[in-house]
Amino acid sequence: MTDDKATLERAQDALRAVNYPGFPRDIVTLGMVAGLELLEGVIRVTLRLPGGRSEAPGELERAMAEALAPLGVGLELRIAAPAAAPPPAQAEPPAELLPEVGAILAVSSAKGGVGKSTVATNLACAFAGAGLRTGLLDADVHGPSLPILMGTEERPQGAGGNRFHPVDRYGVKCISMGFFLDESSPVIWRGPMVAGLLQQFLRDCEWGALDVLVIDLPPGTGDAQLTLAQQVRLAGAILVTTPQEVAVRDVVRGLRMFSQVQVPMLGVVENMSSFTCPGCGAEEPLFGHGGGERVASAAGLPVLARIPVEPAVRIHGDEGEPIVRAAPDSASGRAFVQLAVELARRVGLSATPSAPGSA
Ligand SMILES: Nc1ncnc2c1ncn2[C@@H]1O[C@H](COP(=O)(O)OP(=O)(O)OP(=O)(O)O)[C@@H](O)[C@H]1O
Ligand SMILES: [Mg+2]
């Protein structure tokens, strides 16, 4: 009996070496191991897979078997029923979060600094400018950029208990860790985990009825992405890349992660795709070219938009008014509106975004 217990403990330790495909975290830490039993010469591992999957990726099963082999036991893999999602401690009903939100769009990239936050804020302003009820959630709890890019440091108002209202800016309902970063709302710090904070943004924020919620993800393929995929039904994710080869490789990695958790991928945004010389009007492919296409063809996805490099994008961002509002007739302003139109079409939003500025 004690031997069995020791073997199970060793098995659990061994499984800590097995990452979920596409994620930098192991299946034990991610809470996917729902049960371990020792049978004759075999360990039966019950996994709870994200997104209600009923089959484990083949490479995961192989990696688990390899991890257990040194213990002299085989692997019998079982998948827990999808309904077994762990309820929060206060036993709230397991109802889906954000039932009043029409479409939730995640703006993502495995790579940092490619313009995710710039795309997310401009997209949200373009949607709002078209009269869509729009929210913007900054899921980068460690490096929030929404307050600067949207030009507001307003504090979210309390809404009773742990709940709070989003901040309204340019007709967009915004929430960001940056709004809570000083003394005002200690409640938000209860859970120091990314997953906990993000869950609070989804669950405790009074979003109300929205047509679309844009989520600005932190770089990488980590906890925020997984939490989102588990907690809400995403209409889809868009991947931002620059034309460089290195960005392409990272984006393909991000793509793989989303497909593992069964989030639909809507397409690729190639940001910083060309630079038009203000003097002579010539187009320069500053960061190389063809990255969007390479990502798209590697993944079978459309290129949804190409956003040129324009100093004004950064300047208006730093000044707190996204270019799609501040200079809607600029090349980037127009490209962002087109991106919004394209996405609205793909996820079935009713209003058609057009150049904003008055929202
Ligand atoms: N098309 C563009 N033209 C000029 N500057 C741009 C463009 N897109 C983004 N930038 C600038 O590049 C920098 C990085 O952009 P941003 O913060 O949106 O990237 P990110 O992917 O969200 O970064 P992080 O990974 O840190 O979250 C910012 O200074 C931004 O103003
Ligand atoms: Mg960002």
Image: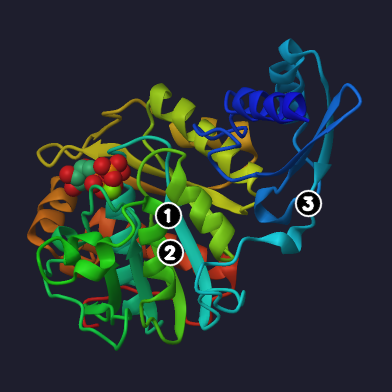
Residue 117 in the image, given as x and y percentages of width and height: 29, 53
Q: Which mark is residue 80?
A: 3
Q: Which residue is mark 2?
A: 199
Residue 126 in the image, given as x and y percentages of width and height: 33, 70
Find the distance from the CA under tag 1 to the CA under tag 2.
6 Å
Front residue (pair 90, 164): 90
- Tell me the amino acid under the disc marked 1: Ala
Dot 3: few (<14), some (14–19), or many (≥20) neighbours within 10 Å? many
Q: Is residue 266 above or below residue 292?
A: below
Report the number of discs.
Answer: 3
Under circle 1, the secondary element is helix
Horizontal side, residue 167 vs residue 36: left or right: left
> Which residue is depicted at the point 22% across and 58% down?
330
Residue 173 in the image, given as x and y percentages of width and height: 30, 77
> Which residue is depicted at the point 25% across and 82% down?
359
Task: For ligand 1, tell me if the residue under mark 1 lies within 8 Å.
Answer: no
- Contact, mark 1 vs mark 2 (Cβ under 8 Å): yes
Q: Is residue 184 above or below residue 239?
A: below
Horizontal side, residue 90 vs residue 327: left or right: right
